[in-house]
Amino acid sequence: MATETNSVIRELPEVVRNQIAAGEVVERPASVVKELVENALDAGARNVRIDLEEGGVRLIRVTDDGSGMGATDLALALTPHATSKLHELADLDHIASLGFRGEALASIGAVARVRILSRTADLSTGFEIREEGGKRSEVHEAGAPLGTSIEVRDLFYNTPARRRFLKRTQTELGRCLDLIQRLALAHVGVGFVATHDGRRLYDVEPEMDLRDRVRRTFGAELADSLVPVEIVDGPIRLSGLVAPPRFARRDQSRQMWFLNGRPLRDKVLTRVVKEGYRGFLEEGRQPAAFLALSMPPERVDVNVHPMKTEVRFRDERPLFGFLVNALRAAVAETDIATPGEKLL
Ligand code: ADP
Ligand code: MG
């Protein structure tokens, strides 16, 4: 047998593997913000603060007053596939947390300079860990308030090809803000503060209800015209606010669905809204509506897409009918007829 002379296959070094895998989770600053804020919410935070610099490319810092992490957990937090939220495959059927893959922090650590500072309620001292270029520091003791603060600096500093795909500061910032507002509307009961280059961009207090949050986000005219939807069928609950048809737009920027606390854009739910407003809207118009659907986690599969913006419902047909009926009833209650506007 001839000896091999020119073998070409090599195993990629772990650092490179992690950088490639990171592309699945971390596309731009807004995806980092999403992962960090979801972690804060999973940790039971009542207040979440997001500080950004240069559209998030230079700095994203998310600070929460949630459960925090002890030294042992902190040492594992940046490890791929290490999670406190899922222990075996069967858990996937009833997962109630926003995260569960254990990939986010590891991915972010592969493509940015990360520092985590955290303290749990039962300890008087906090701990810190850093990761840069795939190299992780030891866990050190460090003074910290209760909760967690995660700093992500210089996103894609070591993957220039990805960095070139980022848009202008204002565009990246806009995407971060849009996401933060969606999360703030999805999580009534939690306060959010967002700053950019030291200036306050957006804030909602924990006490503000959904209508107050819509007012803060989109203004009083829309907020004061909204009609509530509230309907329960066994373990399934739909609640939220719908706007009169005249607030419809060409884009879906004021149409939001939250499924078990997760903002999502889903084809089935978009059709529900379309059906709910049928006859009241011109073709191609998207009504303003803010709708929270809660249902047992085992009746919906959120595991379809890595970014988890798409889901698959079990028993889609009856669910669809139930939601459309509830919506139509609420839409009929809105101030449909506006002076000077012809009804379709
Ligand atoms: P996942 O959220 O899918 O579990 P992540 O990589 O986002 O994976 O986080 C890994 C683990 O780090 C989480 O399971 C959680 O235990 C811990 N963690 C991350 N962020 C926070 C936070 N803000 N507060 C408390 N624990 C956190
Ligand atoms: Mg997570």
Image: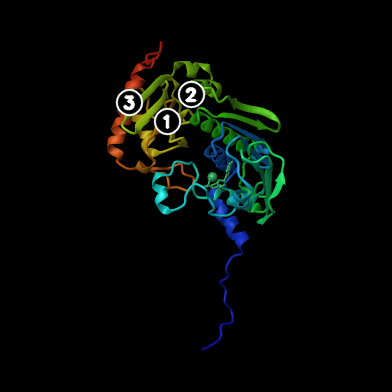
Q: Residue at x 61, y 64 (%)?
A: 13
- Residue sitting at 34 percent across and 34 percent down? 235
Q: Is mark 1 within 8 Å of ligand 2?
A: no
Looking at the picture, tell me which residue is in the foreground, 211 or 70. 70
Residue 190 sits in quarter = top right
Q: CA distance from mark 2 to mark 1?
A: 10 Å
Residue for badge 3: 326
**Pointer 2 with pointer 1, Cβ within 8 A:** yes
Question: With 202 as the anchor, is 298 left or right in this view?
Answer: left
Which residue is label 1 attached to? 292
Q: Quadrant of residue 329?
A: top left
Identify the residue position indicated by label 2 in the image: 210
Sort mark 2 into few (<14), some (14-19) or many (20+) by Cα contacts within 10 Å.
Answer: many
- In what element is the residue under mark 3? helix
Classify mark 1: helix, strand or loop: strand
Q: Label 2 amino acid?
A: Leu
**Coordinates of residue 146 in the picture (x, y in percent):** 64, 36
Q: Circle 3: is it few (<14), some (14-19), or many (20+) Cα within 10 Å?
A: some
Question: What amino acid is at disc 1?
Answer: Ala
Which of the four quarters of the rendered structure image does ligand 2 lie in?
top right
Looking at the rendered structure, the number of numbered marks drawn on it comes to 3
Q: Residues within 10 Å of mark 1 (few under 14, many from 20)?
A: many
